[in-house]
């Protein structure tokens, strides 16, 4: 399990690339919020997040993180991550997405970190 906030981001990218949706979902807190696309209302809880991540995993993505800044205080961390996602659309055409995420993570009782707010379009 991720021992730093940055580890969460890199483990998430690897899980999505490998199609391991359940491993990606396990990185979220039970009460997490996820913004699936620019301007969308947040999805709440791991059931809604799982459905959205399954759609991303279907793109067979290579998600490349570029973590720009991590700030930790009191068991909470923010992570700014400039990312690119290369994948294949449903019709077989290449797809490229990019953005800068503004994520909030919370330290878990076991010392690992979990995503509380995942906003890939937030910064």
Image: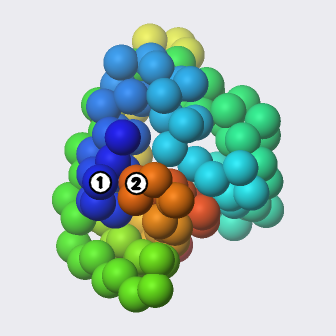
The reply to whether the C-beta atoms of the residues labelled 1 and 2 are less than 8 Å apart is yes
Q: Which residue is at 74% across, 57% downward?
A: 31
Which is nearer the eye, 3 or 18?
3
**C-alpha separation, residue under disc 1 versus residue under disc 2:** 5 Å
Q: Picture coordinates of residue 3 (x, y %)?
A: 29, 54
Q: Which residue is at 47% across, 65% downward?
A: 107
Vertical position of residue 105 compared to residue 46: above or below:
below
Residue 117 is left or right of residue 70, and the answer is: right
Count the marks: how many? 2
Q: Picture coordinates of residue 70 (x, y %)?
A: 28, 76
Badge number at residue 112: 2
Which is nearer the eye, 106 or 123?
106
Vertical position of residue 42 compared to residue 90: above or below:
below
Quarter of the image with the C terminus is bottom left
Look at mark 1 in the image and give the residue it sits on. 3
Q: Quadrant of residue 17?
A: top left
Residue 39 is left or right of residue 56, and the answer is: right
Secondary-structure class at tag 1: loop
Residue 110 is left or right of residue 96, and the answer is: right
Vertical position of residue 111 compared to residue 102: above or below:
above
Packing grade of label 1 (10 A; few <14, some 14-19, many >=20) is some
Q: Quadrant of residue 32?
A: bottom right
Quarter of the image with the N terminus is top left
Q: Which residue is situated farthest in the front direction here?
A: 110
Q: Is residue 68 visible?
A: yes
Q: Picture coordinates of residue 71 (x, y %)?
A: 32, 83
Q: Picture coordinates of residue 101 (x, y %)?
A: 43, 66
Which is nearer the eye, 58 or 24?
24
Residue 84 is left or right of residue 41, and the answer is: left
């Amino acid at each position: 399990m991720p021992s730093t906030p940055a580890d969460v981001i890199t483990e998430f990218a690897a899980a999505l690339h490998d199609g391991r949706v359940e491993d990606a979902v396990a990185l979220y807190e039970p009460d997490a919020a996820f913004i699936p696309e620019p301007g969308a209302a947040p999805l709440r809880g791991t059931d809604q997040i799982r459905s959205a991540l399954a759609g991303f995993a279907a793109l067979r993505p290579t998600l490349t993180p570029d973590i720009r800044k991590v700030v930790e205080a009191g068991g909470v961390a923010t992570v700014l991550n400039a990312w690119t996602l290369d994948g294949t659309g449903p019709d077989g055409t290449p797809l490229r997405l990019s953005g800068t995420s503004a994520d909030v993570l919370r330290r878990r009782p076991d010392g690992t970190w979990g995503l509380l707010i995942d906003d890939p379009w937030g910064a």
